[in-house]
Image (tube, rainbow, N blue to C red):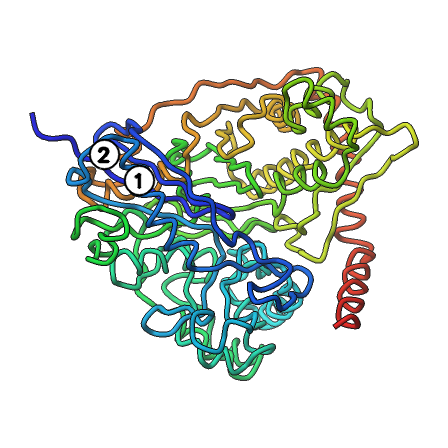
Amino acid sequence: MGRARYVVGVDFGTLSARAVVVDAGDGTERGAAVHEYARGVLDTALPGGRSLPPSWALQDPEDYREALRRAVPAAVAAAGIDPADVVGIGTDATACTVLPCLADSTPLCEVDGLADRPHAWPKLWKHHSTQPEADRITRLAEERGEPWLGRYGGRVSAEGELAKALELLEEDHELYDRAELLVEAADWVVWQLGGSLVRSASTAGYKGLHQQGRYPSAELLEAVAPGLGSWVGKVDQPVLPLGARAGSLTRQAAAWTGLPEGIAVAVGGIDAHATVPAARGVEPGRLTLILGTSACHMLNADEVREVPGISGVVEGGIVAGRWGYEAGQSGVGDVLAWFTRTGVPASYERAAAEAGESLHEHLSRLAAAQEVGEHGLVALDWLSGNRSVLGDHELSGAVLGLTLATRPEDVYRALVEATAFGTRVIVEAFRGGGLAVDDVVVAGGLVRNPWLLQVYADVLGLPLSVIGTEHGAALGAAIHGAVAAGVHPDVPAAVEAMTTEHPVRHHPDPGRAAAYDELFGDYLALHDHFGRTVPLMHRLRARRREAHARRG
C-alpha cells in the first residue's frame, strides 16, 4: 500500500486565515490552525494614523503572508504528518478584495513613500464607498445596451473591481497610473505561492465582469471616465478554471509554509465559491448558503438565466461545466455583532456570564422563547448596505415598531429574522428567474446557532442541512488542491471521494412558516419603500459624508 497523500487548504477570511490538512484520497481532516490577522480590517485609519472616510475598508497584505508562515506549518504540525507527503495546496480569499501592485507583485502600500496614501492599500470586499462609481457605470452600461449587464442582475456592484478602479482613478490618478496591476487577493496569494499570475474563472467572472472571454470594452470604459480604458490591461491575465494547476510551490513559499518545493498550487477561489464543493453543492437545485460576517448564496444550474438583482452568473464560475449563480447579503454576522457590541445593557452581559453563555447564546435563548411576531417588530438588515437584490450600498438598516417595552432580545430576534427575510428575497429571485431551489446546505460561523438556523428553515420553508466541517472554505480549497495535484480528475469526482452527504437537521415548522409568511409581507413592504421608492437613506448617507468632509 502506498504512502498517504495530503493536501492543504487555506481560507483567507476577513479577520483571520484558516489552514486545514486533508487526506487527498478520502477527505479526512487531519489537522487545522487559525491565524488572526495583526491588522485585520482598516476602516477608521491607516497604520500611520491617517483617518479614513466613512464606508472604507482596507487590509494589509503582510497579514496574508504571515498567515502562510504561521497557519500552514501549525496545521501540518497538528495533523502529525510528514510534510513530504503533501502533494498540493489550494487557497481562497474574500472578494472583491483587490490589491494595486507593481508588475513584480509588490503592493503599492509597501512602496517607499506610499504607505500614507489610502488608495495604495488593498480594498476589502466591504469597502463600500464606491456606490456612486458603481451607479455611474451601471447607468452608462444601460444606456449603451451592454449585453453583459444582465449577467450581473442589471447592476454593477460597488464591491466589484471596476467600481474600485474608477474610485482609484478619480481620487488618486497618480496611484492609478503607478498601479501596473490590479489583482484580486485570491489571485495574488496564488502568485506568491506559485510564482505565476493567473486569474480564476471565479474572480474574473464575478468580480471582473469577464464574460465570453472578454472584459467590458475600452469604448465603454473611456466613456465612463477618460483614462479608465487602461483598466483592462491591469486585470487581463490568463483565466483558468477552479481545480486547475496555477503553478508549482516556489522555494520562497516552501520556506514560508514548510511544504515541499514544487508541489501543485491550485488556482485561487473566492471563499464562498470554495465552500460549494465542501458542501456538496455542485449539483443543480442545491443552494449553498454561507452565513458568516456576510452571507453568500451559491447555486449551480445547467442553463444560463439572467436573474434580476443577483451578483452574477458565470459559466464555470463555481464548477466547470455548469453555470454558477451568486447572490449575497453584505451583513449578517456583522449585524448581530454590531448589536451585541452597541445595543445590550450591562445587566444582560452579567446575566450571560452568570449563565455561562456568550451574549449571542444568551440573546438567542431568550429570543427563542417567543412566538413569531410577539416582539411587534420588523427590521431591515442593511447595516452594510444591500448586495442583492437591490445592489445598493447607500441603503442602511432600520427597525420598525420600537416601544418603551421593547427588550434587547426582541431587537436581536428581529435582526435575525431580517437576515432570513433577506435570504428569502434572494431565493424568490432565483425561482422567479426559472431556477430550482430544492434544499439548502448551510456553512459558515453561524451554523453554531441552531435556533438561528431554525428561523431560516421556517422563513424559507425549506429543509436545511449543515456542512459537516467547520472549515468549509478551507476544505473546498483543499479539494481544488487535490484536483490540481492530479489525485482526482475533476472537482465533481473529488467531491464524491472527499465529502459525504449531510443529513437534514432543520425542517420548517408549518405553523411558524405560515406566521413568517405574513411577517415577510411586512418586510417586503419596508424593503420596497426604502429600497425602491423613497431615497431617504441616500440623503442620510450624503449628510454623513458631508459632515465628515467638513471635519477634515
Vertical side of 153 occupied by 120: above or below: below
Residue under the point 67% across and 65% down: 53
Residue 405, given in percent of the width and then of the height, sits at 90, 27
Mark 1 = which residue? 478
Q: Quadrant of residue 378?
A: top right
Crowd tier of the residue under label 1, counting other residues whose Cα lies within 10 Å: few below 14, some 14–19, many 20 or above: many
Residue under the point 50% across and 35% down: 444
Q: Specify which label sits upstream in the sequence, 2 or 1.
A: 2
Residue under the point 50% across and 48% down: 305
Element on which disc 1 rests = helix
Residue farthest left in this picture:
1
Q: Looking at this view, is 35 or 511 the one in front?
A: 35
Q: Quadrant of residue 429?
A: top right
Residue under the point 72% across and 35% down: 415
Residue 376, given in percent of the width and then of the height, sits at 85, 28
Element on which disc 2 rests = loop
Q: Amino acid at mark 1?
A: Ala
Q: Looking at this view, is 547 or 304 the one in front?
A: 547
Residue 523, given in percent of the width and then of the height, sits at 76, 37
Q: How many marks?
A: 2
Residue 77, given in percent of the width and then of the height, sits at 27, 35
Tell me the tag on residue 388: none
Mark 2 = which residue? 24
| Callouts 2 and 1 close, C-beta under 8 Å | yes
- Left or right side of 72 for 48: right
Q: Amino acid at mark 2?
A: Ala
Crowd tier of the residue under label 2, counting other residues whose Cα lies within 10 Å: few below 14, some 14–19, many 20 or above: many
Vertical side of 88 occupied by 49: above or below: below
